[in-house]
Image (cartoon, rainbow, N blue to C red):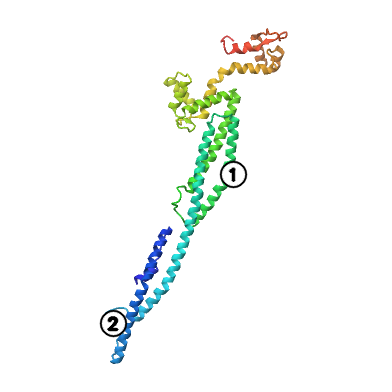
Amino acid sequence: MGAMEDLQDMFIVHSIEEIQSLITAHEQFKATLPEADKERMAILGIQNEITKIAQTYGIKLSGINPYTNLSAPEIAGKWDKVKTLVPHRDQTLQEELARQQANERLRRQFAAQANVIGPWIQTKMEEIGHISIDITGSLEDQMNHLKQYEQNIINYKSNIDKLEGDHQLIQEALIFDNKHTSYTMEHIRVGWEQLLTTIARTINEVENQILTRDAKGISQEQLNEFRASFNHFDRKRNGKMEPDDFRACLISMGYDLGEVEFARIMTLVDPNNTGVVTFQAFIDFMTRETAETDTAEQVMASFKILASDKNYITVEELRRELPPEQAEYCISRMTTYTGADGVSGALDYISFSSALYGESDL
């Protein structure tokens, strides 16, 4: 009875090791069958001997054995049942082994890809972070580099799609664990979305820096200096300065900071109170701080354009190029140009530009 129950036992396994253990136990059971068959034959022999004795002495057997509830036909029937169940159990175990082997192939196939894709995403995240604060090359070089990264990322999408396909097969096979990788599909999805967001945000930040540079007239050399300062005080090398690092950076640049003044500056660079200063916020702050020091040169350059590259400008040119109020303001305050290349009525826009931001009475 116990053997038949074991042979018909329903099982649930989740690994090759578990099904192999059941197969091993079944093989051990099958190894005991020859000995059991000998016992069965011995029992039949005793039964035959009893029948012969009864026939020889004319004894009528009642058909009931007070010492057992089992009869010879019942034992024969149970033995036949066991012989039928054994190959059926063989087939069931082998089918489950094949299923578990197929599941293991799915696990290994998923893991082989996930163990490449996961680190690839992490590496790209780190490389993008380095590009965004790299002080070599121009912003345009950075932009081109980031665009190449963006295209590489877009091209990599097919690997994510293939992994999604294998993940679907794993779900359909009701596989809930995978010892061959620490990455789940959810981990990969989250990392992938973060990568897409990071490259898009970084490109946007560089675009903003280009706009800031061009709008403020900041040179590439100045931006490189800002980046060098930022990198020096960005201790974690993650594109974010903590307040203490930012304060040390400002002090190194000559700022005389009290608590109140530093708190005011922090509200400018970290309006959302995130507790860090991003590179973009730092650039915005520094361009605002340095804009006035370049104003005289910028105004001078603007006048030179209006004057068609001459060292002087005429009243007619000022009235033609500027709004009336601004033109009359400049005409009334510009001194006569004394250079040898001047003409009648020529005005000195160079000294005017210098005085405009150097003396308070102009």
How many numbered marks appear? 2
Task: Look at the numbered disc 1 and give the secondary structure of its residue.
Answer: helix
Residue 342, x across and y down, in percent: 71, 9
Indicate the quadrant where residue 359 lies.
Answer: top right
Mark 2: which amino acid? Asn
N-term-proximal mark, 2 vs 1: 2
Q: Is residue 277 left or right of residue 143?
A: left
Mark 1: which amino acid? Asn
Q: Is residue 28 left or right of residue 96?
A: left
Residue receiving disc 2? 65
Q: Is residue 79 left or right of residue 66?
A: right
Q: Which residue is most to the left?
A: 67
Image height of 162 relative to 65, above or below: above
- Residue at image location 44% in from the left, 66% down from the top: 92
Residue receiving disc 1? 155
Indicate the quadrant where residue 142 lies.
Answer: top right
Image height of 215 relative to 348, above or below: below
Residue 54, x across and y down, in percent: 29, 89
Residue 217, x across and y down, in percent: 60, 22
Q: Work out whether residue 301 or residue 272 is closer to the camera in this orientation and state it.
A: 301
In this rendering, the label closer to the viewer, 2 or 1: 1
Mark 1 neighbour density, 10 Å: few (under 14) some (14–19) many (20 or more)? few
Residue 223, x across and y down, in percent: 55, 25
Q: CA distance from mark 2 to mark 1?
A: 83 Å
Say whether residue 252 is visible. yes
Q: Work out whether residue 137 or residue 96 is closer to the camera in this orientation and state it.
A: 137
Say whether residue 60 is visible. no
